[in-house]
Amino acid sequence: MVYGERDGTLSDRVHALDAALSGAGFGARASTGILQEMWEKWGTAGDDGCVDLPVARYSGEIEAVPGGAELALRFLAEPTGVAAASGYGPREVFLARARGMPTAK
């Protein structure tokens, strides 16, 4: 879970949320670039819903479907293109991870 203020500040409420989620048993972190994080999350959510679930139950199974990995990458290109046009082009580290997901086992 990633959270933060839209203006990038680490406000008192972000610090309070960070303290409350510390040790919650799942990954949680404050971000000074939450809008970037949200656009990137949107990019993978679209891919997951359009390809992963209908084509295969697990990401690693997509490559077993003829053309599955290529289809997943095409679905990734659409939302990441919209994000870039909106001023929040995905970071290379995000793209590398997202491009590897269709074939991850």
Image (cartoon, helix red, strand yellow):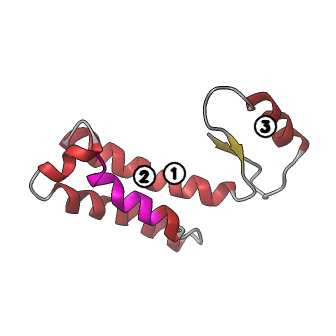
Q: Which residue is mark 1?
A: 41
Residue flagged by tag 3: what amino acid is it?
Asp
**Disc 2 from disc 1: Cα separation:** 5 Å
Magenta segment: 95-105
* Quadrant of res 6: bottom right
Say above or below: 94 vs 27.
below
Q: Position of residue 19 (x, y in %)?
A: 82, 33
State if disc 1 and disc 2 touch (CB < 8 Å). yes
Q: Which residue is mark 2?
A: 44
Q: Quadrant of the N terminus?
A: top right
**Disc 3 from disc 1: Cα separation:** 20 Å
Say above or below: 63 vs 80.
above
Closer to the observer: label 3 or label 1?
A: 3
**What secondary structure is marked by label 2?**
helix
How many neighbours does mark 1 have within 10 angstroms: few (below 14), some (14-19), or many (20 or more)? some
Q: Position of residue 69 (x, y in %)?
A: 22, 58
Residue in the image at 70% along x and 44% along y: 29
**What secondary structure is marked by label 3?**
helix
Residue in the image at 18% along x and 53% along y: 63
Q: Is residue 49 left or right of residue 10?
A: left
Q: Which residue is mark 3?
A: 18
Residue in the image at 75% along x and 32% along y: 22
**Disc 2 from disc 3: Cα separation:** 24 Å
